Image: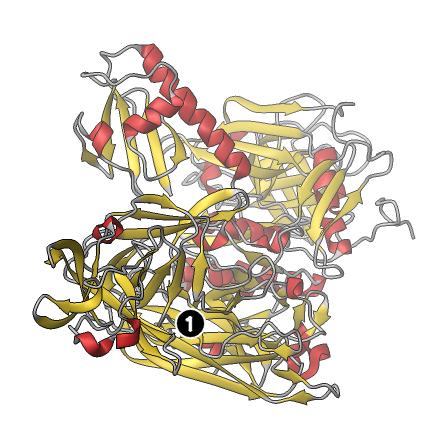
Amino acid sequence: MTILVVYPNKLDLSKRDFCPVVPGQTLNAWMSANIKGYYASGTPPFSYRVNGRQLTTSDWSEYVWQDGDLIELYAEPKDPVTAIMAVVAVVSAGMAIYAMNQIPDNFQTTTPEGSPIYDANAQGNRPRLMGIIPELFGRHKTFPDIISEPHWYFSDDDEFLLLMTSVSVGDVEFSSSDIIIGDTPISKYGVDIDYKKFGPGENVTSHPAHQNIYTSREVGATASTSGIELKGSVNSIVANITRTSGSEMTVLSEIDGFLTEHWPVEWEVGNVVSVSGTLGAKSVSESHPGGGWRAYGTEDKLSFWSQDSALKDCQKGDYIQYPFSVDEKGNIDKWAVGVIVGVGSGHQDYVPFNVVLVANSYGHIVPVNTVPAEARYSEIKFSGKDDGRYIIKSKTETKAKLKRLYPSGNTEEPWWSMFTYQGDNKNWRVTSENSLPGKPAGPFFACPQSEVTDKIFVDLKFPDGIGHMDDDGSISGLTLRVMIEWRGEGETKWNKQEFKRSASTRDQKGNTVHINLGRKVRPEVRIYRITGDSSDSRTFDRIEFKRLKSRLEANDKYEDFTTMAVRIRGSNTLSRSAENKLAVIPIRKLSIPDGLGGWTTDTYPTRDIAPAVRYIIRDSGLSDVQIGHHELLRLHEVWKARGDTFDAVFTDDSTLFDVLKKVLAVGYSEPTLNYGQIVPVRDEPRSVFDYQYQPDNMLGKGLERSGKFIDEEEPDGIEVEYFSTETWKPETVLCLLPGDLGLKPEKVRAFGVTDETKAWRFGMRIRRKKRYRRFQYSFQTEMDAFNSNYLDFVALADDVPGYAQSGRLEDYSYQNGRTTLTFDAPLEWGEGVHHVALRKPNGKTSGPYVCDRGSNPFQLVIYGNLDFTPDLSGSIEPPLWLFGAADSWCYPSLIDDVTPQGTEKCSVKAVNYDARVYLDDDNEPDENGYPKVA
């Protein structure tokens, strides 16, 4: 493809317009054809570059664009804006038209789009040149990528397809029941399909599909046949027009109302053609006793003398006929072909004559008695002026340069330099004497440019069978012969290999012919029939050149991913449209927890989340030291008990954290960084507070709170898209709370979820978070909040009357199973149960504890002992406390963000904690998407 790029501003190369253009033209020609009012100027409006090379003004009209050129025009600021904008407009319009009409060619894409796995309309096998190799986790249907060009071949008259595919990065496990074509397991096809799986690094050469076989794009099905039909030779042509120019000839034939120049491909250099039907044929006779066939003066050389001026209208090299024998009555019964080798005049008895000296068909002078005496006064016959035999000296696809020969043999006439009749001529017949026996198909290159091969394959098909139907309806045998010729690029000599096939059947036949070249070349190949093609409808001799293939270098193993080689026999049980619908449902093999706080050395099939998380982190280049294994293994037990799995295929590039977010999301978790380790954090029901923050350890304005009431414009439900294992296509499920109508649901995607109930729970978690997490908190502390991590469960308090009280602990005592706490402020008691919580020296929360009134307003009593020993020595800050009614002693919250502000303080954001968020984590939906009621 040739691309034209226009930069309207030379100083800002980020702004540009581009479109494909047709090669074979100059820039001036393109401008003239596309830009209204364009004229060549001495100071062009653009700088002109091709493939990065600066071209001159003269190149505008001289350099012809080649296929693959990158043409760049840089607008010069001195020139009129209108001229520049006219070019930009044309280029922009050209690109728009191109984009609308362009058919995607996946074999040619440099950076392909993501896998079609999740697009039901595009699912299928395809190459992914320069693309991301899909990576499977868990169990999921995938369409293996083509990693070596698929190719067909014939064996025992059956046609087979070989596919070499990449299933996934890493090792996977599957069986024949997990391999599907269309919607049918391959086990249903019996022996028509076989496969072999190769693990990462395993040698793949045991299966023929591993070969890198290139199939020529020029050979294949036509509008009416499954291959290029091999025809018999074109032996004779009477064209609409035979055009001559000097010694060159071309024939023009009418095709669909248009005259088209051509030259038969099988008429090659060195072949001989004869031309007949040209103007100028005549006969000259003479009755004068001194004329007719006689000696050339006194020399015994055959010549013809005549007073007829028509004899003068000839030249050396003209073909003639002279009498060669007579019958018993003296009548001429045979004429011989000769050639004029001399033209002149003579006198006999003072009578002037025109004289021609005659040679035989080989150009040799013959004696006078060559013509019988009885035929002395018979005529001399002249052929047409340009009739004769010609040898092809050179040729192109449309014309040939010729040289005239003597009527017999291969000796060139020394006098001939050009055709007598120049230009367009009608009714000329051109006949081949020794062309190829059949019309060649080709030559075609067997491998791409810059590639070489030492082995080629030719697929021949006999679509009607082989044989001849006899009068009694039986089929008699027939042998068909084909010549396959090849030569290296740039070579002139053809190497030949004959192929023949015999049969007596109307069943289709096919053969793949293997040809070892013996050396590495880029071969061009042509094929033609040796056996002529019959016009008898009872003869079954059609031959189709179906495929031309070459063997290129191939990998013998693939280090990092699992591959699968497949052989499919073409049969009536499998349509061609299903051949690119080869799917596999594998399960990934990874190291799994060993139950002892570590991981297994061997890999096992698993759908679990934790093994995928560990593998992804390690695969990114990190080590186990940088993984929070304690929490990961704890969550593994949680996910395992709940049946949470991650089943998906990654097909696009992404960052480590983005991938981890997707994997952990199905377990309601997220990745976090904590002191150099990646630690998963799960959003789950909480009962134990991690930390507490209150006016005593807050800065500035203290706790700020904001919230949002339910808005009528909010989505009234969640619609989850997931990839179903039932259909292996995207499906949706509606997730509704009581009161939701589901008329305007928010759409989310549950990547990695393949079960409808799991997808509903995923969506209900989102729906409940949107309904019940509606309050946000923010505050600042000194270094206190550096202790908190993402989603830590914290108790927050402010100084709003009627809620929590807070302060510092002044004294405590434990006696007789009761602990008495003395605070720095009097306590306000109300009705019902009250709670108290204290902050430990490490910042963690102790409690809350149910408490009763003490002996004075500053005291309270709890039953049992504290879970830590308060330090009231004054060496450290005394414990802080929170006190209040059971339902209002704090704002239960989850840490959302901790942002350092220097080294001595930080700002914190949190959201309210509400246990209702988790109520559907183990629930099931009813038929309408609402939580099922027991």
Question: 694 or 491, which is in the foreground?
Answer: 491
Question: 823 or 455, which is in the foreground?
Answer: 455
Q: Quadrant of the N terminus?
A: top left
Looking at the rendered structure, the number of numbered marks drawn on it comes to: 1
Q: Secondary structure at mark 1?
A: strand
* Residue 204 in view in this figure: no
Q: Amino acid at mark 1?
A: Ile
* Residue 276 in view in this figure: yes
Identity of the residue drawn at 14% across and 69% down: 295
Tell me residue 217's x, y (percent).
45, 60
Question: 794 or 637, which is in the foreground?
Answer: 637
Image-quadrant location for residue 776: top right
Q: Relative to 307, is 164 above or below?
A: below
Could you tell whether 336 is left or right of 664 in the image? left
Q: Residue furthest left?
A: 298
Identity of the residue drawn at 51% across and 44% down: 789
Identity of the residue drawn at 70% across and 41% down: 766
**How packed is label 1: few (under 14 Cα within 10 Å), some, or many (20 or more)?**
many
The residue pinned by badge 1 equals: 527
Q: Relative to 702, is 614 above or below?
A: below
